[in-house]
Image (cartoon, rainbow, N blue to C red):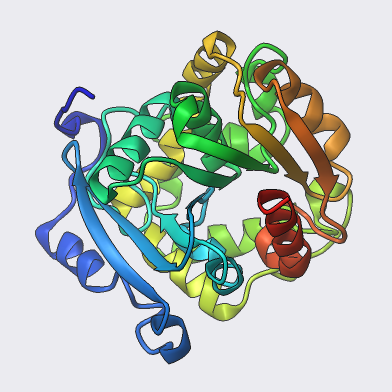
Amino acid sequence: MERGAPDAAATPPATASATAASSAAHDAATRHDTEFNKTFTHKFAEVRGVRMHYVTGGRGPALVLLHGWPQSWYEWRELMPSLAEHYTVYALDLPGLGDSQGSPRSFDKKTLARYVDGLRDRIGLDSFDLVAHDLGAGVGFQYASQFPDRVKSYVHMDYPLPGRGLPAARYRSFSWHMAFNSQKKIPEQLVDSPGDVREYLTGFYPQVAFGGAAFGGTRTSSPFTREETDEYVRTYSDPRVLHNGFELYRSLDQDERDNAAARPVRARTLLLTATGSLAATLPTLRPGFTDLTRSAEIPKSGHWLAEENTRAVRDEILGFLRG
């Protein structure tokens, strides 16, 4: 794989103090969690100029977890102990997000998948099972397409796939936040302080939760605990991480082209969606997969599957991977 330096012009400058603070706080959410720390460890590895952060622990075959927006590795926190009873878990912060420091050359999901493979190489994994959610599932699809011999099985969670059956322009019409996040400069200008980040995230999380506005409801309560929200606010309050998160949406047109040209994923695949979302999501995946083994809606869950119904997600993942 060709090595390259991050494109400094693509992201706003980060001060030395901000970078140092982010590095020092990488385990803020788990530092005092004695039970979690018996199994899991925070680690970093350099990949093509990006210092990638991941959390690992457990025993057995390797299982890689990729998060969505606006989250980090921490979205898997409640699932990880159960998964670690059967697998050696690697929960990644995607390049430029969470506590991964530096920025990739692009935020199209094909490029991000290559950074994930660079981390795989640094860790020393030959092959693994892969679970991915939201925009992380955009990375997961591209990874399984580009590196078919390295993915034993794949779980794709609640992410319609831009490509042959879904133009990026129509994808952005699904929710106001997809259109807003795709705008150049405007999101950063309006969400430009830690207080703004907290207000934006806490206002957004309920809207795509079960019973939220995206599902025709009126829910205003967050599906996340205060600790979960605080962790996401901490990471996205870094201006560079905030910007990089918006870049995930600005690259959707390139994702559409890349996905349309991608080789179909041949790994056996499980699709999990929010309640009521399967019918809209499944057709966007069919062109890209040759072995879509099972598709299921998670009961009483909106977009935040792992948090809203942890037990059902755990049972689906373990049942599929071990089946």
Q: Position of 142 compared to 218: left or right? A: left
Mark yes or no: residue 196 visible: yes
- Rendered position, 192 above or below 283: below
Q: Position of 269 compared to 139: left or right? A: right
Q: Residue at x 37, y 57 (%)?
A: 98
Q: Quadrant of residue 79?
A: bottom right
- Rendered position, 208 above or below 41: above
- Rendered position, 143 above or below 213: above
Residue 179, horizontal then vertical, whole percent: 60, 32
Q: Residue at x 71, y 67 (%)?
A: 310
Q: Position of 264 compared to 146: left or right? A: right
Residue 129, horizontal then vertical, whole percent: 54, 46
Q: Position of 28 compared to 85: left or right? A: left
Q: Residue at x 80, y 23 (%)?
A: 283
Q: Quadrant of residue 223?
A: bottom right
Residue 164, horizontal then vertical, whole percent: 67, 11
Count how many numbered circles sit on residues in the image.
0
Q: Quadrant of the N terminus?
A: top left
Mark yes or no: residue 237 visible: no
Q: Residue at x 21, y 66 (%)?
A: 23
Residue 252, horizontal then vertical, whole percent: 52, 24
Name, please, the residue furthest toward the left. Answer: 16
The foreground one among 297 and 155 is 155
